[in-house]
Image (cartoon, rainbow, N blue to C red):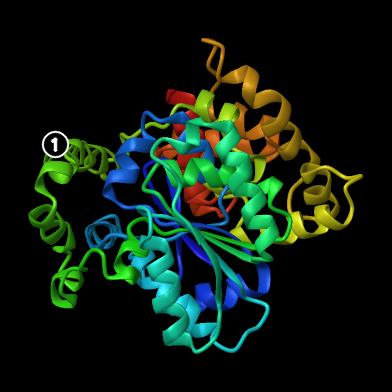
Amino acid sequence: MDIVDFLNVSIHNITTNELLEDLNHHGGVVVTPNVDHLVKIQSDRELLQAYYHSNYRVCDSKILQYISFLLGNPIKEKISGSDLFPAFYEYNKYNEDIRIFLLGAQEGVAQQALVNINQKVGREIIVAAHSPSFGFEQNERECQEIIERINHSGATVLAVGVGAPKQEKWIAKYREQLPQVKIFLAIGATIDFEAGHIKRSPKVMSEMGLEWLYRLSSEPNRLWKRYLVDSLPLLWLVSKQKLNQYRFPHELQTEYLPLGEILQQAGLLTPQDIRQTLKIQKQDNNHRFGEILIKQGHLRPETVNFFINDLPQLVNTDNKLRLGDYLNNAGLLNLEQITETLEQQSLSRRKFGEIITQKGWVNPKTLNWFVNLQNS
């Protein structure tokens, strides 16, 4: 599973069919980043944390897909929640292990969606539905009542459609209290679409990246600010990323990101490496994530120690090291390699990073990550 880095979010570059197969095999939390989400994540730390604890982040925006081509790493497919959810229940039409709980929409709408979907599928794949009150996420008693409903329903899948960032935060906060649920889907307005309460944009508009325009024309009072004002900073931020000037503060990484996510952003782990390690850790809770990485041969002890112990201290100090020193401390370059690189640099006037990447000692993504650390 490849990833595409969008600002401070790694989006999984995966097709719908690949995602459905992977979900059934591994389970996990699916979130669907779009333009609005990426802008919110720049300042909403709770949403950022929820995103980094998800298992699948798939592109819910034709605009983001277009931008990915500009960034030189094309996203294979736009997978919106409203496309993924019907594909999911059709894919699992005959899979009795898939039992879905719908959470979201206005009173009665989720129940209508339940009826409509079960009629389409030909069985009770939706086992229960609930429309929470406005502001329910701030009412712990109501949240616990919802958790009890879900656990009592026997659902193995929870589809939450209460809007972003509320749905992502709610899943992140309460998923551990839902032991029977293996798959969590953040699906936005999909419950309204399934109930026929709100019409989706014509398919041709969606394929052209104009679904936002259709929704704006349908709900101008609610959506004008999101689409016409709040989303504008993305263009500036993406331009900075294209010019390699976007900086995601490393102090936020060390505070909010799981170790695996930091290592993935630094180009040192793949999503497959993370999944394998988490699977081993689940079977053996006596070993930490970093210990398993070392034992499995994914990373050297010096590298794991750098990211766990040294990095939090480095980002909180004004004393910056040279690039080679950072890489040496992280166990990615030895002193002989640094000396050789400096000698070649003095003779050719080439950049330090250019030499070490050309020699294959450090990959370009890892180099860029450490350059950002040096400049932050």
Whether 146 is drawn above or below 115: the answer is above
Residue ranking furthest to the front: 108
Decide which of 129, 171 is in the foreground and name it.
Answer: 129
Residue 183 image position (x, y, % from top left) = 60, 63
Secondary structure at numbered mark 1: helix
Whether 198 is drawn above or below 176: the answer is below
**Is residue 108 among the parts visible in the rendering?**
yes
Quarter of the image for residue 189 reads bottom left
Whether 95 is drawn above or below 243: the answer is below
Query: What amino acid is at disc 1?
Result: Val
How packed is label 1: few (under 14 Cα within 10 Å), some, or many (20 or more)? few
Q: Which residue is mark 1?
A: 229
Residue 329 image position (x, y, % from top left) = 68, 30
**Is residue 173 among the parts visible in the rendering?**
no
Residue 270 image position (x, y, % from top left) = 60, 58
Decide which of 210, 169 is in the foreground and name it.
Answer: 169
Say which residue appears at 77% left-offset and 43% top-offset.
290
Say which residue appears at 45% left-offset and 41% top-offset.
368
Residue 310 image position (x, y, % from top left) = 69, 24
Whether 314 is drawn above or below 168: the answer is above
Say which residue appears at 59% left-offset and 89% top-offset.
94
Say which residue appears at 58% left-offset and 48% top-offset.
146
Q: Say which quadrant the C terminus sits in.
A: top left
Q: Is residue 81 left or right of residue 355?
A: left
Residue ranking furthest to the top: 318
Q: Is residue 327 left or right of residue 18?
A: right
